Amino acid sequence: MGLWSIAMMGMWMNVRGKYNSVLAEFKVPNANALMDHYRNLQADLADAQSEKDRSVKLNERKHAGRQQELERENRLLQKERDELRVKYEGPDKEEEESRLQLREEAFQNQVELLQEATRKESKRNVLERFGPGPHEVQFSFTMQGVERNFVVEMAPLEYVPHAVHVFLEQVEHGLWNGC
């Protein structure tokens, strides 16, 4: 026997050992019995899969009515929730903010219109009653028996027409007398 024959015999013995250990693992006497065992396992697996599919379908049919009932109840509860939100929370927050922003802008425009009208009317009144200016008011007072005077010059009408108008009206009506 040559080296080649010894190597082949060693490999055959190794394969034969693995073959015998597989047969022992599945507790079968030969390869034909192993194949029969494999076919039986495949048939059992197919039967189990079929039984599982049948059970799933039966379960779906059994609970389909309850599932539809729960879905319908869920839709009704969502609708009720949305109605309560509208009732208690009011309109959409973005819509509300937009409406308030427009209202605030309208108020601001009204304030600006009133301020401008007051400026124009005050300037017109000062020019009509007290002339174009510069507007000065002389204050006289007595201190320790000595009469003293000082002059207050008003700001130009272009800057604060209403303040000038109110102050000149107070002086005209004597509201600063005796102070």
Image (cartoon, rainbow, N blue to C red):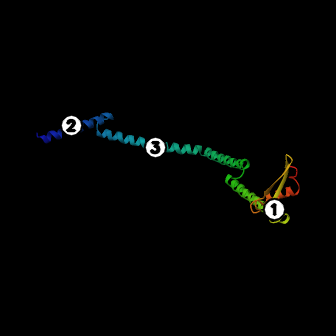
Q: Given contact means CB atoms under 8 Å apart, are the residues at marks 1 and 3 in contact?
A: no
* Residue 36 in the image: above or below residue 111: above
Counting residues from the N terminus, which is met first, the one under dot 2 or under dot 1? 2
Few, some or many C-alpha atoms within 10 Å of disc 2 (few <14, some 14-19, many ≥20)?
A: few
Few, some or many C-alpha atoms within 10 Å of disc 3 (few <14, some 14-19, many ≥20)?
A: few
Alpha carbon separation for disc pair 2 and 1: 122 Å
Kind of residue at badge 2: Met
Q: Nearer the viewer, mark 3 or mark 2?
A: 2
Which quadrant holds the N terminus?
top left
Horizontal placement of 66 versus 26: left or right?
right
Q: Which residue is located at x 35 percent, y 41 percent?
A: 38
Kind of residue at badge 1: Ser
Q: Quadrant of residue 63?
A: top right
Residue beneath label 2, please? 13
Counting residues from the N terminus, which is met first, the one under dot 1 or under dot 3? 3
* Residue 142 in the image: above or below residue 172: above
Of 129 and 140, the residue lying toward us: 140
Number of numbered discs = 3
Few, some or many C-alpha atoms within 10 Å of disc 1 (few <14, some 14-19, many ≥20)?
A: many
Residue beneath label 1, please? 122
Label 1 sits on a secondary structure element that is: helix
Counting residues from the N terminus, which is met first, the one under dot 3 or under dot 2? 2
Horizontal placement of 68 versus 175: left or right?
left
Percent of width and height locating residue 50: 47, 44
Q: Which residue is located at x 42 percent, y 42 percent?
A: 45
Q: Quadrant of residue 109?
A: bottom right
Name the residue furthest left: 1
Residue beneath label 3, please? 49
Q: Nearer the viewer, mark 2 or mark 1?
A: 1
